[in-house]
Structures are given as structure tokens and as C-alpha cells.
Image (cartoon, grey):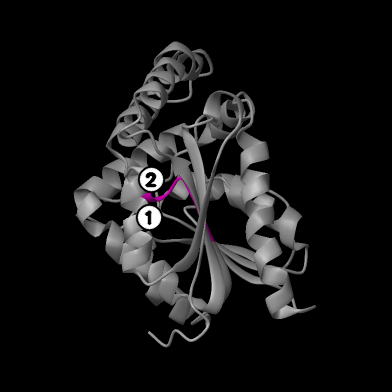
Amino acid sequence: MLRKRSAAARPDESRGEVLSDEFDRAAGRYDLLTRLNPGYHDALSAAARALVSRLRGRVGGEPLVLWDLGCGSGLSTRALVDAAGDDARIVGLDASPGMLDQARAKDWPSGVRFVQAYAQDLPAVAHEHGKTEADGAFAAYLLRNVPAEQRDEVVTAIRDQVRPGGWITLQDYHVKGRRAATAVWTVVCWGIVMPLSVLVRGNPAIYRYLWRSVLDNDSTTQLQARLERAGLTDVSWRTGTGWQRGVLHTVLARRPADDEA
């Protein structure tokens, strides 16, 4: 129901492996739970369209080249395909083999493929796939899987794989420093998400982790500072609708056109 990503920067192998295993256990029921989340798919689609709309003028009629970081079961990938068209070249990256099995089992255009890796491995994956720079990158529900001390590194790695003038879109739940949002998040998790995960046998442990991870996630102010430290510009924010207002946030940022870093 509430999406969370296993493609995190590697703080250590044991933590990454445990988290990946938990997502593997949840993978079979993950799409079902997201369908029960009001506004979940609409928010993903809106974020994907916002990214694509900023790239269209830059590349003209050429197919877009995009990263989908922390792609999970492919729901964000589908949103990108719907927004960018079947000719888009999209690489989805995630650390959970179980989630990627779910993604690969779906029907995709020929330009879509999936890679098992951590977000910190993005530069090596890009080199292996012959993509030193993409037009844009999409990362939904990714950074809170990354230890706070390594988030700057991951944001910089994402920036470096987007061509100068390209755009990055991040979407996640940010409630730190917001009492009302924190209360809503806790009620939704304990009153709806975890009971539903038990009902559909969707691995409740991962959804308890999701609750904690959002409480520990960056505030919007902290993430804004990370984006600025990475040299990203034209940063804009918007929040979700319905119960997600003030809880879910989407941020877009641009790598400067003259950036040669």
C-alpha cells in the first residue's frame, strides 16, 4: 500500500541484504497493497509527467533516456512509459531480486530493461550499459532507504548520471518536523497498512520498517539542502492530495546546463 524502495546506497552489506530480503518477501503482494492506497498511482503518474514535460523541449522528437532508481516491482517504470511513450529508453534499478522478478514478469516496450544494483552502484551500472548521462532520473521512495550520512553521495551520483540541463524527480514521504503529518502517517500505517498486510499475507515486517523509515527520513528542508549541495538548481516542490497532503512530497531539480562536474 505504501511504497518503499530497497535500492539503497550500501551502508554495509548486512543491512542492505536484510532490507533486500524483506522486500523479496513482500514482493508477491506489493502491487496489490499499492492498489489499495488511494492516490498512490495518481501521484506516481503526476510526478512522471512532470519530469517528462521538462525534458520534451530539450530533446525535441528524440526518445527520452531515463533512469528509474529504486524501481521495485515496476510501478514507477510504468508511470514513466505512460508519460514518455513506448519509444523511451528506461533502465530500472533495484536491489531486491524479488521485486525485479515482479517487474520483469510484466509486458514492456523494447527499450525498457531492469538491473539489480544499489543506487550507489549507479555510476558503474551506467558505464556497463553505455549510458554515461541520461536525459532525466526518477527516484520514488528511494532515499529513505539510504543512511543519512550517505544520502549526499547518492544525490550526487544521480546528478552525475543526468546530462547538463537534465532533470531529476524525487518522490517520498517527508513528515519530520510536521506534527500533523506525523500523526496522519502513524494512523495510516498502524490503522490501515499493517492490518491489510496481515490480511493479504504481504510481510507486515516490511511495513513496520516503512513507518519507522519515514519518521527518520529527511525533512523537506534537509533534502532541499542536499540538492543544493549537489549543485542542482530550479528546485520546486509540491505535496500530495487527500490523506497524503503534507505527507507525500515531490521535488524536481535541474542539473545546470553549464555543469561540467
70 vs 214, left or right, is right
Q: Is residue 9 magenta?
A: no
153 vs 187, left or right, is left
Identify the image quadrant of residue 68: bottom right
The structure residue drawn at horizontal position 66% and vertical position 66%, both measured from the top left corner, is: 54
Frontmost residue, 80 versus 91: 80
Frontmost residue, 99 versus 7: 7
**Alpha carbon separation for disc pair 1 and 2:** 6 Å
Amino acid type, label 2: Thr
For the residues labelled 1 and 2, say whether their Cβ atoms are less than 8 Å apart: yes
**Residue at mark 1:** 224
**Which residue range is magenta in the image?**
138-143
Residue 39: percent from the left, percent from the top?
64, 31
**Residue at mark 2:** 220
The structure residue drawn at horizontal position 30% and vertical position 33%, both measured from the top left corner, is: 177
| Element on which disc 2 rests | helix
